[in-house]
Structure formats: C-alpha cells, structure tokens
Image (tube, rainbow, N blue to C red):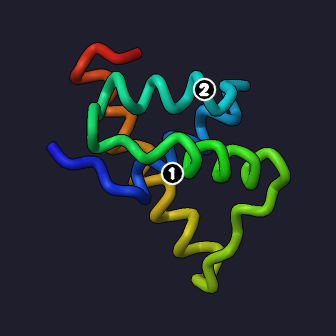
Amino acid sequence: MEVTRVEQRAYIKIAVLRKRNAMECHSELVEALGNNALPYHTVARWIGMFQQGDEQRSRRPVSVRTDLARAVIEQLMDYIKSHGLH
C-alpha cells in the first residue's frame, strides 16, 4: 500500500500534537514505510512549520483542507492500526 506525501504530512501534524520531535517522527515513518518515507529534512521542515502554526500554504478554502485532512488522518490511523504500529 502506498502512502502519499499528503498522508505523511498529516501524520507529521499529528506527531507534532503528540509532542514528537523530528527524529522520532522520521523514525516512525521509516519503520512503517521504509524507503518510501519522506526524507528527514522534509520531516524536520514540516515539523517546524506545524510548531509555528505556518502550515496553511494552500490556497484551498479551509473547509476543503479540513475535510481532506480529516479523511487522510482517518486513513492513516486505520493503516497504523491494521499494521500494529500504534
């Protein structure tokens, strides 16, 4: 099963809420996705943006981002549970 950049980004956002640092978050992604995980520098950059509250770079309406994020998070959490990665 492929996990997209958008899905990984949603996971990173959740990791920030769970007080994970970049190293922990990247390690979790590598454990789950292997070579398909985002590079460490991307994870670290996104964590920094989420911590600063500067993640709203998209020009999509907030409702679209919220609905998309909710769907992605639900899929990612289902994937994590089904693979025993919790």
Judge by depth and name the residue closer to the eye, 15 or 75.
15
In x, y percent, where is residue 16? Answer: 68, 35
Q: Quadrant of residue 12?
A: top right
- Location of mark 1 (residue): 9
In x, y percent, where is residue 86? Answer: 41, 15
- Location of mark 2 (residue): 23
**SS type, badge 2:** helix
Q: Closer to us: mark 2 or mark 1?
A: 2
**Total label count?**
2
- Viewed as shown, does residue 86 lie left or right of 49? left
Residue at 46% x, 45% y is 39
**SS type, badge 1:** helix
In x, y percent, where is residue 85? Answer: 34, 17
Residue at 81% x, 55% y is 53
Query: In 3D space, how far apart are the residues under numbered discs 2 and 1 (Cα atoms)?
Result: 15 Å
Residue at 60% x, 26% y is 23
